[in-house]
Every structure is written in structure tokens, then in C-alpha cells.
Image (cartoon, coloured by chain):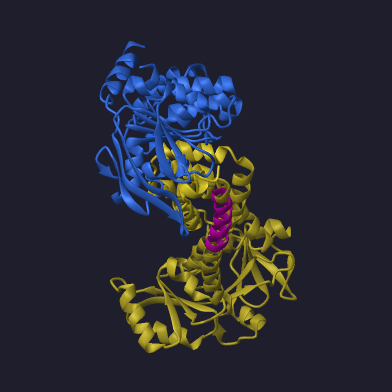
Chain colours: A blue, B yellow
Amino acid sequence: MRRRQRASDSSRAGEAAGASVVLESVSRAYRGVEVLHDVNLTIEPGQFVTLVGPSGSGKSTLLYLMGSLDQATRGRILVDGVDVGQLRRPAEFRRSSVGFVFQLHYLLPALTVSQNVELPMTATRISGRERRERAHLLLEDVGLLGRDRSLPSELSGGERQRVALARALANHPKLVLADEPTGSLDTVASEQVWRLLDHLCRRDGTTVIVASHDHGVETYADRVLQLVDGRLSERASDRAQLR
Amino acid sequence: MTALAHSVSNLRHRPGRVLLTAAGTALGIATIVALLAVSAGATQTAGRFINLGRSDLGLFQRDAADPTTSVLPQSMIATLRRQSWVSDVMGLQLLVDEVPGQPAAILFGAAPNSFETQRMVFTQGRMVGSGNEVALGDDLAPELHETVGDTVLIAHRRMRVVGIYHIGVSEQDSGAFIPLSTAQAISGHAQEVTSIVIKLAPGVRSSTAKRLLASRFPGLLVISDPNEALRAGANGQLISKMSLVIVVLALLIGGISVMNTMLLSVVERRNEFALLSAVGFSGLQVARLVLTEGVIISMIGAAVGLVLGTVGAGLLVGALGARAFVSPDVTAWVLGRALLIGILIGVVGGLYPAWRAAHVSPLRVLSQQ
């Protein structure tokens, strides 16, 4: 147990700094229809940012652009100084720098909870032993240590999303992008997920950008950004007002 | 969890589909094993024909359907005997389907004093002399319930059993010897033989003799190695070519079967491949995952196919009524080739689905949530 704790401390030590995110005049159009208009944004490392706005306003598109799942039509996006639009190996960038949480958990039904958490690590050169140790710690973090051998089908919706959160943090990403992570959960489960996301990412210094309709998340946010018809604006967050 | 463990977990999640696809591959592999084993057995049998009496060379008519339908002039024997590089020579007339109720028994027509007959050990009686006399192999005699002094009906002739012998070659011990002239009369080929076997003079190399024979007797097939023996007959070549056709068919059908299953799986698992891409799997890593699954399925099929084929080879020979004539030869080489084909089926069948899986767009799939 002590050895595991040491491994935990050492693995967390190097991940203290999150990524800075800079968007310069970013636009995205699909078949001639522009869904993002000239977005400019700077996010400091370690910030917890919430992206709110009605459905179809471009929240998911913005997240996918920052996570290199999509390409901007115009402008450029820098994540920790790396121009995401110019990446030759975007999968490698996602593997090392980004953790995704989606509305649906997308856990693989054939794999156990622990194996699902290990999944992003299997694409790396991390040894099997370290993968298992990391998965163990992450499941401990999200309060599911006793369920490591369960299949996703044996978990509740909230538990599945907590596993998805652990999976997103598996490779110690500098940036976590969460797209409506509580969209399928009840209020209690949603609150658990927000609290965990806030706690784990602040502890590790990870930058978090969350797109959500759930106003509950704004309590945890350093900044609240609003997207309406593809145009970005910012309003004061509860946390900022409290300060 | 390794990538291999991931593939195995995925397959265990869909056992029914995996087993059905593997069953298709297994049938293909079983057919290949059975045919290759029978083909190898036939090669050995034909090889034993040319090695009758420990001869060095076997001569057959080129392009004969099989060794028993070859026709050579008997006068060649005298010509060959005069050659300095020949130590001894004899003619053989092979007859099949002439012993009632024993379709696999071969009748050997040979001169009683030839070098071949000198190897025969008689447990009862003696070697044939002339006319309607027959010596039965010690495997055939009990099958016919005949012994020395009995009369047996062979090729619609009543022939007297004069001896029971043992040589140690299964085709001969389960067959019978009759005088060469009688065999020629039965076949309707007087002054002709099926094959001629040659013992070379000491110090003469078979390659040299083959060259001399080829220039002196065009149209002759000269065999010195049992592995070449299948060339002695078009039927042997047919088995050989059929094996090749079955291999190609198994590759195609098995490959398409695996491809179909894997494609279905890729379509069903679009979310999974999109997620893998999102968490950092490269296209190559995703493709390798799918390809591994395809190979595992076909390996399961191949393993079952190897067992089925080994059992099936014996059944096939029995169904063809050639149990005494051909013993299926399931060698490590036969099994190795079949296993290799099994792996190829997985690779061929998995390539396109792997390519499709590697090109699943995470954006398109995950944004549809």
C-alpha cells in the first residue's frame, strides 16, 4: 500500500501544471454554415472553465476543436503552445495531453471497470504493472475501488460516469474536456461528478473546460463563458463573485 | 491489460458469433488437412510402387491417369537389360478392382523369378509358377477366408491359391501376386506392362541413368524419388491440384466469412473505435486490434479444423474405399501448412474491417450523442 502511495505521489508530482489554451480568431463552418464566429479566448493553466449556452450554440464544436478531434476553418488554437491544427499525429497529442468525458460514458462493455480505466494507457508504453497501479489509484479517487472487477453493466449511471472520469485522467492530461458529462444523470449523481472533477483537477493543477446545461457546475467554475449562435462572451462566475 | 487481452475480452463478449465464424474456418481447414494428408499418403503409396523390390528407378508412361493405367512395351525390358549401367530390370502389371469384395486389393503381375519376388517370405505354400495360380498377401488372405489349396475368383477366373506371403509393404501384403502373362491376359495388354523397375549397376548415379533414359525413350516418366511419384499419374496431379484449389477456396470463403463477421462487429462497435481514437489510439493501433481479433477467430477455427481434418482424412479414405491402398499421412508439415492458411484467413479477412475501424471518425460518432 505504501509503495502504491509513493507511486501515486510521484506520478502526481509531475503533472502539477495544466495547459494554457489560446484561441485566435477561430471559426468553424460545416457545409458553408458557420457555427463558430471569430472566437478569441485565453485560458490560464489550471483554470476550471464552464461553457454554457443553448443547444446548437457551438459548445461541443469548440471542445472538439481544442481536443484535436476537429479542425478549425479559420484561426488557430494553441494548447500549451502547440498549434492543434498543425499536428501531424493528433492521436499522440490526445493520448498525452487531453482527457475527454462525454455525455455518454462510452465504457467498453466487454472490459471490467479497471480495464476501462487502463484503456488510454494501453496505447502508451506504460508497463502493465504501472497501468494497474494507476487504475487502482484513480478508482480510489472516484470512490469505486471495490468495483474494479465489475462490468459496466453492473454499475449505476453515476458510477459509470465516475469511471469515465477516471479513464479521462488515466494519462495525467494537462487539459480535461467534458462535454455534458452529467447530461444523463440525476441531480445527486451530477453533484458527485462536479465535485470530483473540481477536486481532482484542482489537486493536479489540470485545466478543465466543461460544456454543460447544468447550472450546478457554475458553482465550481473560475470562469463562465457563454456561447450564443457561435459567438463567445464571458460573465462573472459565482466563484469569482465570492472572491 | 494488454492489447491482446483487450482483443480476447472483445471476442469473449460475443461467443456465439465467434464460434460460428470459427466453425466456418474450421470446415475449410479440415478439408485442407484431409486433402493434404490423403495427398501425402498417395505420394507415399506411389513412392512404394517405384521402390518395389528395392529398385532404384521406376518407369511409367507419361501422362497416364494413374500408375495402374500406364502402358509400356515389354520389349523395353530386354533392351534395358543390355545396358551396362543396369544391374537388373523387371516388368510389373498392376491391376485394380479385380478381387471381388476387395476394391482396394491390387493384383501384381510379375515374373516368378524377378528380383521383386525374391523378397517375399512365404508363410504357407510357394510363389506362383504359371497359368491361373495366385499367391495372396497375408493381410488379404484372412479377408477372403482362403488358404493354400483353395480356389478364389479373380477377374472372373477361378485361380488356385498356391502360397501366402509377407513382404512388409502394406499395398503388397493386402494384394496378391499372379504370373505376368496371366495379368497381361486379364488386362488385354499382351506384351505390355504397367511399369518397369530398374536396379542400377553399382556406382551409377540415378541422375545419370535418368538422363540416359530420357534421351533414349522419349515419352517415358522416370521416377527415382518417392516425392516425385505423384507425377506418375494424372490422378495424383489431380489430387495435388485439387488441394491447391481447396486451399484457395478456403482462403476466399474463410476470409470472406471472417471479413463479414468483423465488418459487422466494426459497424456495431463504431462508438468503441471512436472512443479509442479520442483517448489517443492511432489508426494503426485500432487496426491492429481488429486484425488481432480476426486472427484469433481464424486460429480457433484452424485448431478445431486440424483435429477435424485429421479424423476426416481417415474417413475420406474409407469413403473412397482406398483404406488399404492409401494411408493418410498427417505430418507436421501438413498441419503447419493448414495452420498457416488459418492465420492467412484471419489476416486476409481482417484487413478491410481493420482499415474501416481505423478510419472511424470520432467527431462524427461522438457528436451524434
Q: In the rendered picture of this protein, how many numbered marks are placed on residues?
A: 0
Residue A185: where, in percent of width, then height? 58, 27
- Measured from the top left, where is residue B87 in percent x and y? 37, 75
Residue A48 picture location, percent across and down: 38, 27
Q: Residue at x 60, y 63 (%)?
A: B325
Whether residue B75 is visible, yes or no, is yes
Q: Quadrant of the C terminus of chain A?
A: top left
Give whichever of A173, B56 is nearer the camera.
A173
Name the residue nearer the viewer: A91 or B137. A91
Query: As drawn, is B78 to the left or to the right of A110?
Result: left
| Residue A124 showing in the rendered view | no
Magenta residues, as a range? B250-266
Residue drawn at (52%, 53%), measured in percent from left and top?
B330
Q: Where is residue B33 in the image (x, y as percent from the top left)?
A: 54, 56
> In the image shown, does A1 or A228 lie closer to the viewer?
A228
Figure quadrant of residue A186: top right
* On screen, residue B97 above or below A208: below
- Indicate the quadrant where residue B208 lies: bottom left
Q: Is residue A100 above or below residue B124?
A: above
B284 vs B275: above or below = below
Q: Does the magenta stretch include residue B16?
A: no
Considering the whole magenta stretch, tell me its main secondary structure. Answer: helix
Q: Please indicate whether residue A98 sits to the left or right of residue B139 in the image.
A: left
**Quadrant (top left/top right/bottom left/bottom right) for the N terminus of chain A:** top left
Q: Which sits in the foreground, A229 or B248?
A: A229
